Image: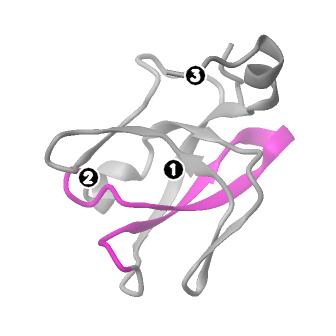
Amino acid sequence: MSQITWTDFQAVEIRVGTITEAVEFPEARRPAWKLTVDFGNKVGTRRSSAQITDLYGREELVGKQVVAVVNFPPKQIGPFSSECLVTGFVQADGSVVLAVPDKPVANGLRLA
């Protein structure tokens, strides 16, 4: 495993946000949701493509807080521009378990 410096870590903006919308993404190569995530006033709303359909339905996602990287440049995924990276843990079967705070926190708080 390679090591990073404290400065490297500080450069990554990892923040909490609340999913406000989850819609199907039929154009994706692998099943995915198109998510809209509210990161509060400082960061605003960002969109993300997330391959989490194995474990999460639309109804379960809306209102869920997630941990995401918000300072990557936008990534074009087919016809969709992904503006943040929602984080999770990839299991042996390929399904992804979302990284989430264990208690509600204010949208936009930065991981320390």
**Residue most extreme to the left:** 93
Circle nearer the viewer, 1 or 2: 2
Residue 42 part of the magenta segment: yes
Residue highlighted by disc 1: 19
Question: Separation of disc 1 and disc 3 at Cα?
Answer: 32 Å
Dot 1: what SS?
A: strand
Q: Mark 2 points at which residue?
A: 56
Q: Which of marks 3 and 2 is nearer the N terminus?
A: 3
Q: Distance between the residues labelled 1 and 2?
A: 12 Å
| Disc marking residue 2 | 3
Q: Label 3 sits on what residue type?
A: Ser
Real-space CA distance between mark 3 and mark 2, rounded to the nearest whole angstrom: 32 Å
Q: Is residue 2 left or right of residue 10?
A: left
- Which of the numbered marks, if any, corresponds to residue 58? none
Mark 3 residue element: loop
Q: Along the line of sight, which residue is nearer the eye, 78 or 111?
A: 78
The image position of residue 54, as x and y in percent, is 20, 57
Q: Tell me if mark 2 has few (under 14), some (14-19) or many (20+) residues whose alpha carbon lies within 10 angstroms of its own.
A: some
Say what amino acid the circle numbered 1 marks: Ile
- Give the mark, 1 or 3, whose residue is nearer the N terminus: 3
Q: Is disc 1 surrounded by few (<14), some (14 to 19) or many (20+) residues within 10 Å?
A: many
- Residue drawn at the location 25% of the way across and 58% of the way down: 57
